[in-house]
Amino acid sequence: MKAAGSGNDSGLLNQLEKLIDELIKDNPEEGRIRTYMEEAGLCYTEDPIERMHSVLSALKGVRGSVPNSLAKKRANKGGGHDRSI
């Protein structure tokens, strides 16, 4: 996993969002999950609980290091609903 504060946290956050979008689908594609996990620097596993644990741990690492402008943009995305992490 990439270190928090590495200067590429917004890129990691985007990767994690893509991964989460795929994970929450009714029928997620395993190939995409594997690719997205690898792109985010996470170890792939077939266990859905371990996957979510990995994603949440990665989100915790970038949570405090996302620039305010990006956090505000994400909070306003989707009709003003707060989607902050």
Image (cartoon, rainbow, N blue to C red):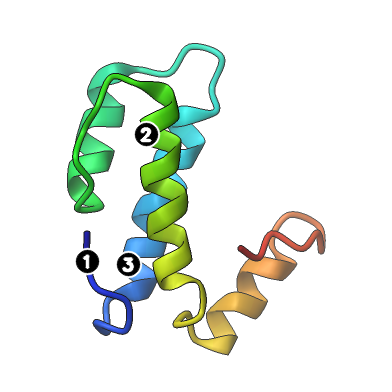
10 Å neighbourhood of mark 3: few (<14), some, or many (≥20)? few
Q: Secondary structure at mark 1?
A: loop
The three-letter code of the residue at mark 3 reads: Gly
The extreme top residue here reads: 27
Q: Secondary structure at mark 2?
A: helix
Q: Nearer the viewer, residue 21 or 62?
A: 62
Residue 56 position (above or below residue 51): below
10 Å neighbourhood of mark 2: few (<14), some, or many (≥20)? many
Q: Secondary structure at mark 3?
A: helix
User: Which mark is in front, 3 or 1?
Assistant: 1
Residue 7 position (above or below residue 34): below
> Which residue: 32% across, 76% down?
4
* Label 3 – label 1 distance at C-alpha: 10 Å
> Which residue: 81% across, 57% down?
79
* 61 relative to 45 in the view: left or right: right
Q: Which residue is mark 3?
A: 11
Q: Nearer the viewer, residue 11 or 4?
A: 4
* Label 2 – label 3 distance at C-alpha: 19 Å
Residue 32 position (above or below residue 77): above
> Which residue: 22% across, 66% down?
2
Residue 49 place in picture, x, y as percent: 44, 28
User: Which mark is in front, 2 or 3?
Assistant: 2
The three-letter code of the residue at mark 2 reads: Arg
* Label 2 – label 1 distance at C-alpha: 16 Å
Q: Which mark is residue 51?
A: 2
10 Å neighbourhood of mark 1: few (<14), some, or many (≥20)? some
The three-letter code of the residue at mark 1 reads: Lys
Residue 71 place in picture, x, y as percent: 60, 76
Residue 61 place in picture, x, y as percent: 40, 69
Q: Which residue is mark 1?
A: 2
